[in-house]
Amino acid sequence: MASAATSALIAVAAGAFAAHAVSDPAPRELLKTGASYQMTHALAALAGVVLAELGLPRGHTAAALFLAGTTFFSGSLYGLASGAPPWTGALTPIGGLLFMFGWAMLAWASIRRPKGQ
């Protein structure tokens, strides 16, 4: 839960930085996109933790996938906005795949209840 909350904090900071400190439209858009996806998946990670606390252990796996996806997806966009080499953009789709796996795991966690529940 602390990692998800920290991720949300970083998303707010990146969005604020994009809105108030970056004048070039291309990096600003990269930062805004990264912040938007990071916030969405920080909240999704919190949902995964809540499911895990309710006895659905796959929720932890979903949360981990969302946070890993954020590292690749948003991290690569933040890097590109900051002048990282163009190959950094190759990491973005890896993050997108991790997001999709996370959503699939969250769906599975929510419909596959452990025995006795």
Image (tube, grey):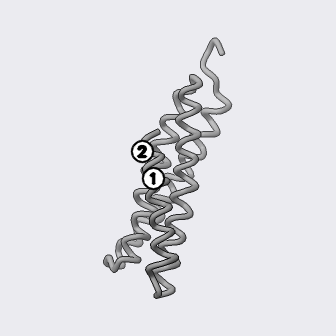
Q: What is the C-alpha distance between the residues marked 2 and 1?
A: 6 Å
Q: What residue type is labelled 2?
A: Ser
Q: Name the residue under label 1.
A: 7
Task: Find out whether the residues at labels 2 and 1 contact each other: C-beta distance under 8 Å.
Answer: yes
Which residue is painted at 53% across and 71% down in the image? 32
Image quadrant where one finds the C terminus: top right
Q: In the rendered image of this protein, does residue 37 appear above or below residue 17?
A: above
Give the tally of numbered discs. 2
- Local crowd size for mark 1, using a 10 Å CA cut-off: few (<14), some (14–19), many (≥20): many
Q: Residue furthest bottom?
A: 24
Q: Using residue 4 as the reference point, say whether residue 54 is left or right of it.
A: right
Q: What residue type is labelled 1?
A: Ser
Pick whichever, 112 or 19, lies toward us: 19
Which residue is painted at 54% across and 47% down in the image? 101
Q: Mark 2 points at which residue?
A: 3
Q: Is mark 1 on a helix, strand or loop?
A: helix
